């Protein structure tokens, strides 16, 4: 699997378990499929009622793919994303990410697995307003055994990758919405995850900023071979992804090719 190091962006080392060793394990023989769900059901109890958020879902997502999970509100998109990211547990069925069955992991093992393999991008950025862009991106690395100079190199590389090398000392209030989301993406990739999970990453942006973020995600996928699984309502996203997976009322109703499966690569645009 291509990593950030392939583009002279270093990968996290030390004893944290993040980075090259995790990537090599993920890319081992038998892990050509990044995600495989088999007969997955997720139900929740609300008072006396049972809500079936996902109903017998089976699908596969290829390694190095950029895919969108789409469907109306309440269709189970975010529930599916949370299962892939190891944030939630399936009620029944199997969730395999890389070559690892994560359904049976306990909370402690799942947290360690998630730290090694998953980068998270949220709709509302989730940046800490009292920290600079640099300090926000540095946060995940504080959980590793990297020394401060090593962390600095990683953070600078991640911000450079998203086109914000000149905004490192800016606070979130000094950035546009699109720039804030770029910082959030830098924070998600700074540990060099094997899968980037994005929940409505363009949902709080205007049209131009949304397209810039979709283009950035496309280039991260193409240049660094990062598998990206994105939940979105944004119909523009279909032009940027390889495959669209559609859900309705918790049921997987099929997939179709996205625009990037037949579209030439486009150069990464600098941030405004």
Image (tube, grey):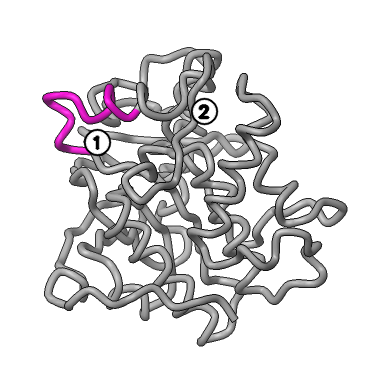
Which residue does the image show at 38% across and 45% down from the upper left?
4
Q: Earlier in the sequence, mark 2 or mark 1?
A: 1
Q: Could you say where residue 208 lies in the image, as x and y percent from the top left?
A: 51, 86
The part of the image, by quadrant, that contains residue 98 is top left
Please say whether residue 33 is one of the residues in the magenta stretch.
Answer: yes
* Left or right, residue 73 beside residue 31: right
Q: Quadrant of the C terminus?
A: bottom right
Please say whether residue 29 is one of the residues in the magenta stretch.
Answer: yes
Which residue does the image show at 50% across and 56% down from the upper left?
199
Which residue does the image show at 82% across and 51% down from the upper left?
131
* Left or right, residue 170 beside residue 146: right
Which residue is tagged 2? 115
Of residues 154 and 49, which is closer to you in this image? 154
Neighbour tally class for label 2: few under 14, some 14-19, many 20 plus, Cα within 10 Å = some
Tag 2–tag 1 contact (CB < 8 Å):
no
Q: Quadrant of the N terminus?
A: top left
Of residues 91 and 148, which is closer to you in this image? 148
Which residue is tagged 1? 37
Mark 2, secondary structure of its residue: helix
Q: Could you say where residue 5 lies in the image, as x and y percent from the top left?
A: 37, 42
The part of the image, by quadrant, that contains residue 245 is bottom left
Which residue does the image show at 48% across and 59% down from the upper left?
161
Magenta-tinted stretch? 23-34
């Amino acid at each position: 699997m291509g990593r950030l190091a392939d583009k002279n962006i270093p990968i996290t080392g030390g004893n944290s378990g993040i980075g090259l060793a995790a990537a090599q394990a993920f890319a081992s023989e038998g892990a050509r499929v990044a995600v495989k769900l088999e007969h997955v059901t997720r139900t929740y109890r609300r008072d006396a009622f049972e809500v079936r958020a996902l109903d017998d879902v089976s699908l596969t997502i290829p390694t190095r793919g950029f895919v969108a999970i789409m469907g109306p509100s309440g269709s189970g998109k975010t529930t599916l994303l949370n299962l892939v990211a190891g944030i939630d547990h399936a009620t029944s069925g199997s969730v395999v990410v890389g070559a690892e069955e994560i359904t049976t992991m306990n909370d402690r093992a799942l947290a360690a697995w998630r730290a090694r393999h998953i980068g998270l991008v949220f709709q509302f950025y989730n940046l800490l307003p009292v920290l600079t862009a640099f300090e926000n991106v540095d946060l995940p690395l504080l959980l590793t055994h990297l020394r401060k100079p090593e962390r600095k190199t990683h953070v600078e590389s991640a911000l450079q990758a998203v086109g914000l090398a000149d905004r490192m000392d800016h606070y979130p209030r000094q950035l546009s919405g699109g720039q804030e989301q770029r910082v959030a993406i830098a924070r998600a990739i700074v540990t060099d995850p094997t899968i980037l999970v994005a929940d409505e990453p363009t949902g709080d942006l205007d049209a131009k900023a949304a397209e810039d973020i979709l283009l950035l995600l496309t280039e991260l996928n193409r240049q660094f071979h990062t598998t990206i699984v994105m939940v979105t309502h944004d119909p523009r996203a279909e032009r940027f992804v390889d495959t669209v997976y559609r859900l309705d009322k918790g049921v997987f109703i099929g997939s179709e090719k996205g625009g990037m499966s037949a579209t030439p690569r486009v150069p990464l645009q600098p941030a405004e």
